[in-house]
Amino acid sequence: MTDITFSIPSKRKVALEIFDIKGSKVLKVFERDFDKGIYKYSLDTKYLKSGVYLLVLKSDIGEKDRKKIEILR
C-alpha cells in the first residue's frame, strides 16, 4: 500500500494514473469529480510487478503532482 494525499482548490475532474519507468501507462486508478478539499487515497500495489512507477495526478488544468514509488517483491 502507498498513500497519496492531494488537495483540490475548487470542484474539478481529477485522474490518478500509473506509468512505468519507460513512460507507458499501466493503469488509470480513478477519474472522477472532486469537491474542494484535501483527500487521501490508499493505493493497493499488490497487483503491480516489481519496478519503479510514477503516480501522476491530472486535472482539467494539467498535471499537478508526481510521486515515484518502487515496488520490490
Image (spheres, grey):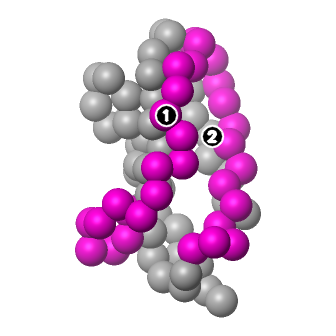
Q: In the rendering, which numbered label is found on residue 13? A: none
In magenta stretch: residue 42: yes
In magenta stretch: residue 51: no
Dot 2: element:
strand
Q: Residues within 10 Å of mark 1 (few under 14, many from 20)?
A: some
Quadrant of image for the N terminus: bottom right
Which residue is identified by label 1?
31
Please name whichever residue, 63 or 15, is drawn nearer the observer in this view of the structure: 15
Question: Which residue occupies 49% across, 34% down?
Answer: 31
Amino acid of disc 1: Glu
Dot 1: element:
strand
Magenta residues span 19-48
Front disc: 1 or 2: 1
Which residue is identified by label 2?
5
Q: Where is residue 48 in the image (x, y as percent from the top left)?
A: 57, 74
Question: Which residue occupies 38% across, 36% down?
Answer: 58
Q: Position of residue 33 (x, y in %)?
A: 53, 20
